[in-house]
Amino acid sequence: DYSVLDHVKFTDWPKYLSSVNRVLRPGGFLILSEFSSQDSRINDETKYKYEHEDRPYPESLYFENDQHYDHYFQESEIKKLFSGFEILEIGEISKLSLVEAGLLPPRLFLNALLKKGETPPDGGESRRPKP
């Protein structure tokens, strides 16, 4: 998932997770690369503004208008959202090659390597047929 979840609204996260769980085999891997809350587009003024508005998820940093949605993830949000997965690696990385080429201002992404549990969440057999 390269910068997909950061464009999915909170209300649709259960659908996103359901789809991931449906297509990913037990023991399968998921690689995430999402906007980080430490990204250069998030500054102290922006954080203050959005932390003090009446928002459904006040601890989260997101921007929304009629045509676009961006969510800037904190590590704790990824851990909570993917609590049914083993987190093998998680950390921030800058997309320097695009910055150095003058194509983008500095961007910081939160990357995670996750492993789905060996046992399906319902404790039963996986519904996916074996090859």
Image (cartoon, grey):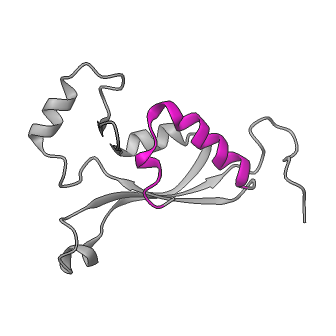
User: Where on the picture, by quarter, is residue 27?
Assistant: bottom right
User: Residue 76 location in percent, x, y?
Assistant: 40, 40
- Start-end of magenta stretch: 2-24
Does residue 95 sit above or below 57 in this rendering? below
User: Where on the picture, by quarter, is residue 68?
Assistant: top left
68 in the magenta segment: no
17 in the magenta segment: yes
| Residue beneath the point at 55% across and 43% down | 82
Nearer to me, 117 or 4: 4
Which secondary structure type mostly characterizes the magenta part of the structure?
helix
- Spot the residue most to the front: 66
Tell whether 116 sits left or right of 92: right
| Residue beneath the point at 88% across and 44% down | 125
Tell whether 77 sits left or right of 123: left
| Residue beneath the point at 48% across and 42% down | 79
Does residue 114 sit above or below 55 in this rendering? below
| Residue beneath the point at 9% across and 38% down | 45
